[in-house]
Image (tube, rainbow, N blue to C red):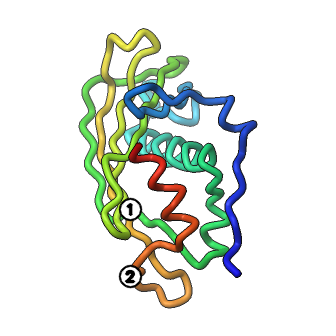
């Protein structure tokens, strides 16, 4: 019997999904996110994107630990980032994330980092993940049914 993925209603209330499917994840630039000049380090954006992606999946009842228990991992296979403006130490912003599609075992995510008033675009990005069988270390032929069903809700 396949393990089930339980809903995480408490997490659902902590974040917002807009009518156009964007998941809004608040970020704040702390000193450890910056270089010596107080500018957000480019790699911090990648970490924030992963945090938002994992939090969004949690709102659908998908815990990453559950994916691992099902023998499924979702490594990044492609990453494209465009830096438009710099965030600085002490800044707060909103990272918006949404999936632009689930194609077989490939998941494509789009991201934007915006000012709190949505007037300034700091970063736009796209990340492609692929489902990998954890034991075999090979790309899966298909997603586990409970994972696929939960992910299909992202596309609606």
Where residue 33 appears, as percent x and y from the top left, is: 52, 35
**97 left or right, relative to 7:** left
Where residue 97 appears, as percent x and y from the top left, is: 42, 38
**57 left or right, relative to 99:** right
* Residue 32 vs residue 99, the one in the foreground: 99
Question: Which residue occupies 67% across, 66% down?
Answer: 66
Mark toward the viewer: 1 or 2? 2
Q: Quadrant of the N terminus?
A: bottom right
What is the distance, in whole Å, between disc 1 and disc 2 at their CAs? 14 Å
Kindly indicate the quadrant of the structure image that contains residue 108.
bottom left
* Residue 47 vs residue 41, the one in the foreground: 47
Where residue 107 appears, as percent x and y from the top left, is: 37, 58
Q: Residues within 10 Å of mark 2 (few under 14, many from 20)?
A: few
Q: Secondary structure at mark 1?
A: strand
State whether residue 44 is above or below residue 64: above
Q: Which residue is mark 2?
A: 141
Marks 1 and 2, the one that precedes in the sequence: 1
State whether residue 112 is above or below residue 58: above
State whether residue 91 is above or below residue 67: above
Q: Which residue is mark 1?
A: 129
**36 left or right, relative to 68:** left
Question: Which residue occupies 62% across, 60% down?
Answer: 64
Q: Secondary structure at mark 2?
A: loop
Question: Which residue occupies 35% across, 58% down?
Answer: 102
Q: How many marks?
A: 2
Q: Quadrant of the C terminus?
A: top left
Question: Which residue occupies 56% across, 25% down?
Answer: 28
């Amino acid at each position: 019997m396949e393990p089930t993925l339980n809903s995480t209603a408490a997490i659902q209330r902590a974040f917002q999904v807009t009518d156009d499917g964007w998941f809004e994840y608040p970020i704040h630039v702390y000193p450890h996110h910056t270089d010596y000049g107080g500018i957000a380090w480019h790699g911090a954006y990648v970490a924030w994107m992963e945090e938002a992606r994992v939090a969004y999946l949690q709102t659908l009842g998908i815990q990453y630990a559950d994916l691992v228990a099902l023998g499924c991992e979702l490594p990044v296979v492609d990453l494209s980032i465009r830096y438009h403006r710099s965030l600085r130490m002490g800044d707060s912003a909103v990272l918006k994330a949404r999936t632009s599609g689930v194609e077989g075992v490939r998941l494509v995510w789009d991201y934007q980092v915006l000012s709190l008033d949505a007037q300034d675009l700091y970063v736009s990005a796209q990340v492609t993940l692929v489902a990998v069988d954890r034991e075999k270390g090979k790309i899966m032929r298909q997603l586990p049914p409970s994972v696929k069903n939960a992910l299909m809700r992202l596309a609606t």
